Image (tube, rainbow, N blue to C red):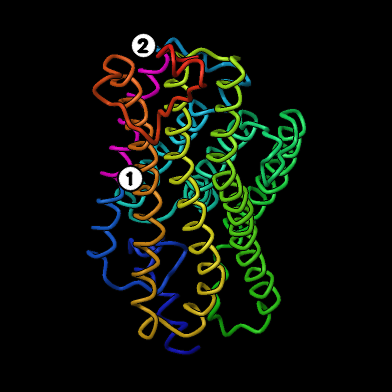
């Protein structure tokens, strides 16, 4: 048995916090990884508190009913699943910081992967709601199907990728004892299958993130122009009153901020998970000393970047809610020519009145 095999078979590896650093075993700097998980737990607590405040605000002050299909497929659904994400993050960080060894690898594996599954569900639910609410203007460059079709497609995709992720996560936790560096030839087939399971899990998740990112990108490119033209047509044809233009503009502005944040998360997730799928086997196969820095980079990327991006999404919602309330109370002090432009006809210009 090689010295590298001995390194992985050492008994103290079970007590090393690096044992559950991103499914990577070749960690040696315990203090470094412990500090990362302390920071992660602090960010997770901040996300959970801010998310809880927003849910209470929308349910209590705005009287939102979350237990409806339209309530879930909106910002409210995004908040609910991000809250579950924050709780899972806290659980994952605490179990790593507190436990000296892994008692149940399947549970620990699910606590790691469920974090990102909840985020992807949250953003996919929000995407369904925003597509349903998107204006269908005839001059739009992209056409989106009706809400029922969007919901069916979204549910089918959600069932496919979530079922695959949950199944593969169980298989990874079940076979986590197979090391890439084992010199036992009888385990070669098991190790090869284990590599495929790891690779498939990360790649499926990365592809799902890419698909949702593309949908958000197309939706964001089309939303502003379609909403602008649709609003101008309705206003010109006297289908809406002037006092509802500003609330509609504010809703579009809020949606634009949140869409940008969600698309950023999906792009980052796609890159991170595809890198994880490719790099994890190389980290194992090439030994601890050579790839120790890669392990540290992946640890920060997977544990600190996602909660930070989620916090940005919540801040975007806070910004949208605060701006909505401020402009509703003091519209004259927050007038912006580009955002709240009113249209005049010749007759209305002569009389000085809006349509």
* Residue 282, percent from left and from top: 51, 80
Location of residue 338 (image quadrant) = top left
Q: Earlier in the sequence, mark 1 or mark 2?
A: 2
Q: Is residue 46 magenta?
A: yes
Instruction: Tell me the crowding category of disc 1: few under 14, some 14 to 19, or many 20 or more residues within 10 angstroms, Cα based.
Output: some
The magenta region covers: 41-59
With 256 as the anchor, is 180 left or right in this view? right
The residue that appears at 56% across and 16% down in the rendered structure is 67
Residue, far front: 350
Q: Which residue is mark 1?
A: 94
The residue that appears at 26% across and 17% down in the rendered structure is 330
* Residue 14, percent from left and from top: 39, 63
Label 2 residue SS: helix
The residue that appears at 44% across and 19% down in the rendered structure is 349
Q: Is residue 162 magenta?
A: no
Q: Which residue is mark 2?
A: 61
Label 1 residue SS: helix
Q: How many marks?
A: 2
Q: In the displayed structure, would residue 39 be above or below residue 146?
A: below
- Residue sitting nearer the eye, 164 or 172: 164
């Amino acid at each position: 048995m090689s010295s590298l095999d001995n390194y992985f078979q050492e008994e103290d590896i079970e007590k090393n916090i690096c044992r559950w650093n991103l499914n990577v075993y070749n960690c040696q700097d315990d203090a470094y990884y412990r500090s990362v998980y302390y920071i992660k737990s602090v960010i997770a607590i901040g996300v959970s508190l801010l998310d809880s405040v927003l849910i209470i605000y929308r349910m209590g002050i705005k009287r939102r009913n979350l237990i409806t299909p339209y309530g879930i497929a909106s910002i409210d659904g995004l908040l609910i699943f991000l809250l579950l994400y924050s709780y899972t993050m806290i659980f994952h960080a605490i179990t790593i910081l507190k436990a000296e060894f892994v008692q149940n690898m399947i549970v620990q594996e699910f606590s790691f992967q469920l974090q990102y599954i909840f985020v992807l569900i949250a953003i996919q639910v929000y995407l369904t709601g925003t597509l349903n609410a998107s204006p269908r203007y005839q001059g739009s460059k992209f056409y989106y199907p009706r809400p029922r079709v969007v919901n069916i497609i979204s549910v089918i995709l959600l069932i496919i990728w979530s079922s695959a992720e949950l199944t593969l996560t169980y298989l990874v936790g079940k076979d986590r004892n197979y090391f890439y560096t084992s010199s036992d030839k009888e385990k070669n087939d098991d190790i090869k299958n284990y590599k495929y399971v790891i690779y498939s899990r990360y790649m499926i998740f990365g592809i799902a993130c890419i698909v949702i990112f593309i949908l958000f990108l197309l939706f964001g490119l089309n939303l502003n122009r379609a909403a602008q033209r649709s609003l101008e047509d309705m206003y010109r044809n006297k289908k809406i009153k002037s006092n509802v233009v500003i609330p509609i503009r504010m809703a579009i502005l809020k949606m634009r901020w949140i869409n940008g944040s969600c698309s950023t998360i999906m792009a980052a997730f796609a890159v991170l998970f595809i890198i994880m799928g490719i790099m994890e086997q190389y980290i194992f196969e090439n030994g601890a000393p050579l790839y120790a820095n890669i392990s540290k980079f992946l640890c920060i990327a997977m544990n600190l970047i996602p909660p930070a991006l989620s916090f940005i999404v919540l801040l975007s919602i806070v910004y949208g809610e605060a701006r909505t309330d401020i402009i509703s109370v003091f519209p004259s002090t927050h007038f912006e020519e580009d955002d709240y432009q009113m249209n005049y006809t010749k007759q209305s210009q002569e009389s000085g009145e809006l349509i």
